[in-house]
Amino acid sequence: MATVSKELLAASSIPLILSVLKRGESYGYELIKEVKAASGGKLQFSDGTLYPILRKLEEKELITSEWRIAENDKRRRYYRITEKGKDQLKQEKKNWEFLTTLLNTLWAPSTTSLS
């Protein structure tokens, strides 16, 4: 099974996290599990990767967070997307759709060869 490079994971981390949070609030470990499950195990954030991104998103006011006591009596920080975050996600989606279209165009067999 091929895994995604660290560089591609880094480039896609903001839209991935915002997309998960658009579905509903979540805490760190749950975010990690959701991305891993949605990717069929090909993408997995580590704690050391995820939490700095969450802090950055919070500084940019794209998400908010609050500490709560979970059912198992553990403290968890729950994250929620803001309206500004939803707007950013719309822009991220447009950017990724453009890049996907561009790459598909460039990867398509060419009818004329320059080489």
Image: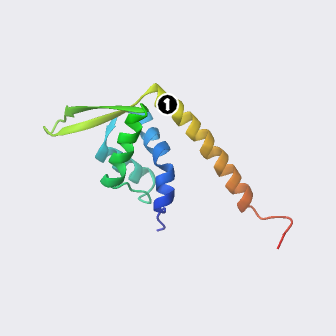
Q: Is residue 55 above or below residue 5?
A: above
- Identified at 26% across, 37% down, the residue is 77
Q: Extreme left residue here?
A: 73
Give residue 53's quadrant in the image.
top left
- Quarter of the C terminus within the rendering: bottom right
Q: Which residue is identified by label 1? A: 86
Residue 104: percent from the left, percent from the top?
69, 56
Name the side, left or right, on which 60 lies relative to 69: right
Name the side, left or right, on which 87 lies relative to 53: right
Residue 29: percent from the left, percent from the top?
29, 47
Q: Extreme front residue here?
A: 59
Helix, strand or loop for disc 1: helix
Count all numbered tags in the image, as a single digit: 1
Q: Which of the pair 77/61 is nearer the observer? A: 61
Residue 30: percent from the left, percent from the top?
31, 45
Q: How is the image coloured?
A: rainbow
Q: Amino acid at mark 1?
A: Lys
Residue 67: percent from the left, percent from the top?
23, 33
